[in-house]
Image (spheres, rainbow, N blue to C red):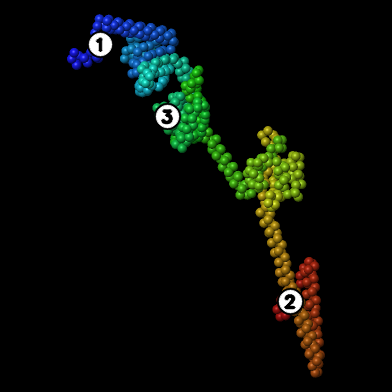
Amino acid sequence: MSEQGKAASEIEPPVTPRTTELAKDGTALRHEIAERTQGDEKRRLEELHHITDAIPSLIQVLGTDGAVLYVNQAVLDYHGLTLDDVRKDDFRHRVFHPDDVERLREERRQALARPVPFEHEQRALGKDGNYRWFLVRYNPLLDEHGRILQWYAAGTDITERKQAEEKLRHVIDTIPTLAWCNLPDGSNEFLNSNWHEYTGLSPTESHGWGWQAAFHPEDLPALMAKWKGMLVSGEPGEIEARLRRHDGRYRWFLVRAEPFRDEAGKIVRWYGTSTDIDDRKRAEEQLRRSEMFLAEGQRLSLTGSFSWKMATGEITWSQQLYRIYEFEIGMPVTFELIRARVHPEDLTLLEKMLEQARNGESDFEWHYRLVMSDSSIKYLHAVVHARRDQKGQLEYIAAVQDVTQRRVSEEALAKARLELTQLARMMSLATLTASIAHEVNQPLSGIVTNASTCLRMLASDPPNIDGARETARRTIRDGNRASEVITRLRALFSKKDATLEALDLNDAVRE
């Protein structure tokens, strides 16, 4: 045997009548198995068709390109077509609403390319010539490698729900507020006429996510974060944001959203309203500014305030009053706590105030002192006014001012005035003393001079009797003048009424 023949004999067994018979039997067995498999597949397919035909939903089996491979009897009965009719290329254009075909064309093409279930809503033409709404859910059949083999689609009639939604949209369109309806993914489906009139945006401009253009750029990030959080949680929520009016002015709105769920609890729509709260926001801002001004005014004037409800004993203090008493801000205030701070000598004043309040006196005030933790003293002035609250309960409102600095200043001023008065008295006494000395010294000097002159005249030889007699008369005159000065001083210090006397100015000048 040649080498080539030998190699062939080693690879292929020799053909004998027995091997030929076995080969024929194997081929027949394979044909038999194939026929049985095809029969099983056919029976399973027939069973599947029987099952799907019994389901009232519209079921389709699609190829990877979206072509119709099979539909159940419900589809044929609804459309009034045969299986050959639905397998034609123009089936979708003949039975689906033209607006929906265009609307879903690209979305459906992209969805069929991904091995992920999806759904959409569309209108289908029935054999009665009317369109009805269907929710079509698509689920892929995948091989062991995750590749798409076929698509299974089930359509559920949602016409009544859509009609109810249409009625609801009509109601939304007529309510006197800004209302809207969004899809489960958060994009807008419908905005009522009030919303369009207010913002000036057309339905085309605001559809989908276009509504974001109406909100203030500074508020939009927080608004979108809140909205996305609600879409994830499925819980209702609200947020405040500024919405632009058609004239370009922004106003504050309270935006509320609520999910609408189907029988299975799945969110099918979001409904919401936008309520104008601009006036409220402005009032709140004015109130905050007023509270800020009041708090700053109290801080600058060292004045605190409190309220005391007689029926409940509730006491409310302002922050400045906490600072005056040097208590921790926000801690509960009781009369025991207040008594512990009041000066022991002024506790009777506090008790008197409480008694006045219990007796229903409307207005009163009092001055009292506090002893602080460092033993320093504070002087306070409180003014109290009684009023009735909305329930008719008696409530006291008080203003308490820290007058320590004023009290210290008043005491320093009083001391300075006393010292000034004493100094003025001393200066007045010195001036008066000098004036008295001057008034008394003049006649005394004249008396001494005249007496000396009189002695010299009497001592001369011969004595000058006439001159001595004249100087003696002058001495008597000056003595009388000194006596008159003393009399006038006595009248001055005895606070007697002044008397008017005639005075010859010429004599006064000559003198």
Query: Which numbered marker is on residue 278?
Result: none
Can you identify the residue that label 3 sits on?
Answer: 209
Q: Residue at x 50, y 18 (%)?
A: 264
Q: Amino acid at mark 3?
A: Trp
Q: Viewed as shown, does residue 97 lie left or right of 18?
A: right
Other-residue count near label 3 (Cα within 10 Å), few / some / many at <14 / 14–19 / ≥20? few
For the residues bearing labels 2 and 1, Cβ distance under 8 angstroms: no
Residue situated in front as seen by the camera: 447 or 179: 179
Quadrant of residue 476 in the image?
A: bottom right
Quadrant of the drawing holding the N terminus: top left
Q: Is residue 62 visible?
A: yes
Can you identify the residue that label 2 sits on?
Answer: 438
What secondary structure is marked by label 3? loop
Residue situated in front as seen by the camera: 446 or 231: 231
Q: Viewed as shown, does residue 326 lie left or right of 226?
A: right
Other-residue count near label 1 (Cα within 10 Å), few / some / many at <14 / 14–19 / ≥20? few
Q: Residue at x 71, y 66 (%)?
A: 423
What secondary structure is marked by label 2? helix
Quadrant of residue 24 in the image?
A: top left
Between tags 2 and 1, which lies in front? 1
Q: Amino acid at mark 2?
A: His
- Total number of numbered discs in the rendering: 3
Comes first in the chain, label 1 or label 3: 1
* Vertical placement of residue 446 versus 203, above or below: below
What secondary structure is marked by label 1? loop
Comes first in the chain, label 2 or label 1: 1
Q: Position of residue 15 (x, y in %)?
A: 24, 8
Residue situated in front as seen by the camera: 219 or 190: 219
